[in-house]
Image (cartoon, rainbow, N blue to C red):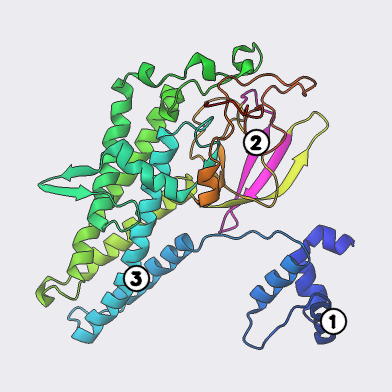
Amino acid sequence: MNFIRVNGPEVAVDDLVMPSKAITASVCDYLYLRIVPTDDHIEVRRRLLWKLGFTLARYEEEYQLLRNRIAEFREVVLQTPPQPSENEHARVRSVGVNLFISVEQFLEDLLCFNVWLLSSDHFTGTNFVFTRQDAALLVPRVLGPEVQSGDQTFTWSSDGANSLGALIAYLNAFRRWLKSRSKSDASAIRRDQKDYPHYATDTVWTFPFRHLELWADVSPEVMVEYVSLIDKLCTQVAQAELPGIRNGIDHKREEDNFPESDRMLACASRLLEVLDIADSRLLIPKLFWAVKAERDAHGNTCERLADYRNVTFSLWDPSAVVGIPTMYFGAPYVIAPLDFLNQPNSTLVFRVSPRTEYREYWKNYPRRRYIPAIEGARDDPGGRDVVGSEPATEPASPLDGV
């Protein structure tokens, strides 16, 4: 039991179950789990633990896949001679096509997540739940259904069918929108007083969500850092010459216009740098799962989360900010890139959920404008015992809306 506690269930299955055919067969028979010779070891382990009742972390594959494809593209280009033949061009094309499919997915995630993050009302609108489909629908509402880039006009597709040129044009449009926020009038999106919770005027706790869009509640110094980060990414994307390289290796282009190896290597290097910045600074909606929680005698809590590369991120409690949900094990989260609220222990964390008909039907129901205090509640007026819990509400009256 001490071995299981120290090493965890996955290591326990690998070391105590899998090495023995007899034990593995006995456990699988008990769990009604059938293993065939073509099953992968890791997949069998995950299925076995799922049958035993463990909630296992499940990570997206697109960001690691993009890293792999960048490395593969670089390797193929390095092996290409100065005077490549048609077969060697074909090898570069076959790898490059897959690479740019991943690049388009990456740029769309980068754009949609940041537009959604800065332009949403997370307190009563998103309820701190991130949905990729909702984020994609928000882009044309914020940046416009069409954007102009040079002499070309690009239209946004909310179903994910955006071309590389459209994604780069909208990314630059987002940079312009972000820089214009410093001159925008936030009074038009100020939250109505009737929508404030009862603890908004508390002298101890801080309620920061006083506007219907997050950018208006971000402190100026944090916004400057964030704009600088987005500006750096956009510059790197422009210097990577993504459309030129993609069009140059297209099979419909003339052979004389095939990109030089130096240009393709420079593109791969800058693309990897863009991915590293977005990945390390949490500018993409990569999943985190809680792996460990520690608490000291003074009530300070440190929760550690891990991403797809097993890079950990620490969140600390308690926080003087109310309205932010806490976390629990067994659910995926995405984390905001910066401490937008500029308060101790106030990093924004969002649950991840798909967009379903059920969620859309019951969205924001029931809802009352004033969030009352609950008699007998704990000292924390935000009611942060449950992750993602919505503000306290009362059942809707049968006469509501009559």
Q: How packed is label 3: few (under 14 Cα within 10 Å), some, or many (20 or more)?
A: some
Q: Secondary structure at mark 1?
A: helix
Q: What is the distance, in whole Å, between disc 2 and disc 1 at their CAs?
A: 42 Å
The crowd level at tag 1 (other Cα within 10 Å; few <14, some 14-19, many 20+) is some
Please tell me whether mark 2 sits on a helix, a strand or a loop. Answer: loop
Circle 1: residue type: Ser
Front residue of 164 and 353: 353
Going by the image, does 43 lie left or right of 7? left
Task: Report the disc number at residue 26.
Answer: 1
> What type is the residue that disc 2 sits on?
Ser
Quick check: 234 above or below 185? below
Q: Kindly report which numbered mark, 2 or 1, lies closer to the viewer in this rendering.
A: 2
Q: Which mark is residue 98?
A: 3
Report the span colored magenta.
Answer: 301-322
Q: Is residue 306 above or below residue 302?
A: below
In the image, is residue 220 part of the stretch drawn in magenta? Answer: no
**What amino acid type is highlighted by mark number 3?**
Asn
Q: Is residue 107 above or below residue 120?
A: below
Q: Nearer the viewer, mark 1 or mark 3?
A: 1
Sequence order check, earlier mark of 1 and 3:
1
Res. 389 mark: 2
Q: 47 and 316: which one is in front? A: 47
State which quadrant residue 346 falls in.
top right
Distance CA(mark 2)–CA(mark 3) = 41 Å
Q: Residue furthest right?
A: 1
